Image: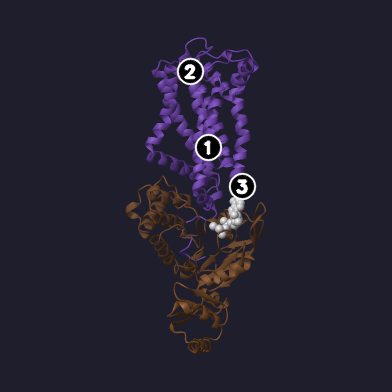
Chain colours: A purple, B brown
Amino acid sequence: MSAIHGAGTAHGAGSKPIWAVVDSWTMTRRELARWARQPVQVVVGLVFPVMMLLMFGYLIGGGQGVAGDFRAYLVPGMLTMTMAFGLEATMLAVTQDLGKGVIDRFRSMPMNSGAVLVGRSIADMLQSAVGLTVMIAVGYAIGWRTHEGFASFLGAVGLLLLLRFAMLWVGIHLAMVAGRPELVQAVQILVWPVGFLSNAIASPASMPAWLGAIVEWNPMSATATAVRDLFDNPGAGGDSWAATHAELLAVAWPLALIAVFAPLAVKRFRDLSR
Amino acid sequence: MADHDPAIVVEGLRKRYGDKQALDGLDLTVRAGTVQGILGPNGAGKTTAVRIMSTLLRPEEGRVEVAGIDVRTRADEVRSRIGLLGQNAAVDEELGGRQNLEMFGRLHHLGARRARTRADELLARFGLADTGDKAVGRYSGGMRRRLDLAASLISRPQVLFLDEPTTGLDPRGRAEVWNAVRSLVGGGTTVLLTTQYLEEADQLADRIAVINHGRVVAEGTPDELKSETGGDRIDVVLRDAGRLAHAASLLPGDVVVDEDRRMVGATITDRMAALTETVRVLEAAGIEAEDIVMRRPTLDEVFMHLTKEDAV
Ligand SMILES: Nc1ncnc2c1ncn2[C@@H]1O[C@H](COP(=O)(O)OP(=O)(O)O)[C@@H](O)[C@H]1O
Ligand SMILES: [Mg+2]
């Protein structure tokens, strides 16, 4: 080949492991740069869950069937809900990318093929970590306290981020299946009943038995219960298997979701060339 | 790769979507350093062909080599030698022009410093230096297309694919993109350009493949295509529009009447014989001609002819 062409590119290098790291970082930086350009959107994203927390904590007197301080019950629930609803942000971002054709440019370049998804994961997890920090700070400001040691605290944060990571893959997969902004809206609406069918805000004890059973098996409930336990906040109670094995389920549920949805999402991504 | 080797070879390409056969045995050879036009109506299979050649899509059947490399088995090597301007804008609208180009440069593994200088180079070259920091979402259509084109040139590709580069642009934006494409030719880049606009293919392409229903229905230089189909034409403008029908009945061959321009046109074979014969019959009938023109068919006429036949 002639000297003037392709001079800048390391041919076929996209598959070398080093490029997996470098390209993933470039893709992560892309998201960071987008946030820097959209500060209002970022702030709105952070404020929304805070508003929800304050609304449920102060305006809508809640805590049906909750024994003990409702706000101490509510904060871990809202932390869980914030992580679970990260699903929407992931879906929206992936849908936008797919619709805009920029993914096609990435796919036509000699970059590492996994970097698009890895970059998305890192960026979304960073954003959620920031969101979690803000929520914890606000929780602290309204009088919520943890009573266990730092290790338990980290364990709780770990479980919350694990749930978020699972939702990330569910989100990528759903976005690739649905592919259209209208369907993202449908999901944005549907997350609410799923969110409320957990023990995040109310206790299953206050619900009809059949509903309570569904609620206790909701992955969000498992995480919320486990996190409350690790923070030593009042829990939802209950003596069903799901309620008494919440720690186990808070790990098993996200891992199961990841095991199912991560390969599906990767396959979907590969199948863009079908 | 020697210069006489083809830059693109496509053989027996087939691709279907459900029961829609998008490509139905497409064959194409593009010489290195030339501009190949792919001309076809909406739905002809242009985008599908470009997506396969640029490694985005896998064909069911057929062989594609770009820069001498098999697209299926060595996609990564092909990717480092091509540039793609897709039918839809493929840049991040929320980022600035410079940020976009730098990001694509890094992903082409230029390294941070060279990605930055390359971005500046391209912004300057495409007249975007002043607006490099503005979010691309606020660019005009022509500017966005030029940025998109700049992005596809980051790695100085050997082969550049342009899928309907000017569709949706106003005349000014179109002229901007045409100029940019012209400036590439001569640099040795091979360009494959799809279009629905005959004028565009005529202006930019060395050779044109007309495709319809997923296969090539005609191929050649613009001149060859014009003389291959239909032959020459004669156009007669009359003084009196009322005599159009009479004049049309006197002319041989495939006759068309254009009332607005007071014109009758016909296909001809022998230019001199046709001219003297036309003048003679019109004079005999007492029909006054204002102007008589003999010309090659336009690509429009060729295109209509080719795609009409094929549609039946
Ligand atoms: N993703 C797709 N799913 C189903 N049909 C498709 C898809 N892409 C293209 N087609 C169909 O394949 C044919 C060729 O499309 P395309 O290559 O986009 O044509 P062109 O670019 O020439 O307009 C069209 O009939 C189109 O409707
Ligand atoms: Mg098209």
| Residue closest to the eye, B6 or A8 | B6
Q: Name the residue carrying label 2.
A: A74
Instruction: Identify the element where label 2 is drawn.
Output: helix
- State the residue in front, A52 or B269: B269
- In this rendering, is residue B85 above or below B307? above
Q: Indicate the amino acid at tag 2.
A: Leu
- Residue at 51% x, 48% y: name it: A103
- Chain-order first, disc 2 or disc 3: 2
Residue B134: x and y, percent?
35, 48
Spatial separation of the CA atoms under disc 2 and disc 3: 42 Å
Mark 1 highlights which residue? A184
Q: What is the quadrant of the C terminus of chain B in the image?
A: bottom right
Q: How many marks?
A: 3
Of labels 1 and 3, earlier in sequence is 1
**Amino acid tagged 3:** Asp
Instruction: Give the answer, above or below, for where A274 lies relative to A37.
Output: below
Q: Secondary structure at mark 1?
A: helix
Q: Are marks 2 and 3 on the same chain?
A: yes
Residue A184 image position (x, y, % from top left): 53, 37
Element under label 3? helix
In front of the other: label 1 or label 2?
A: 1
According to the image, label 3 marks what residue?
A271
Which chain's residue wears label 2? Answer: A
Residue B64 spot, x, y in % from top left: 61, 61
User: Does any portion of residue B212 appear in the rendered image?
Assistant: yes
Q: Are marks 1 and 3 on the same chain?
A: yes
Within 8 Å of ligand 1, the CB of disc 2?
no
The CB of the residue at mark 3 lies under 8 Å from ligand 1 = no
Vertical side of B89 occupied by A256: above or below: above
Rendered image quadrant of residue B40: bottom right
- Foreground tag (1 vs 3): 1
Label 1 sits on what residue type? Val
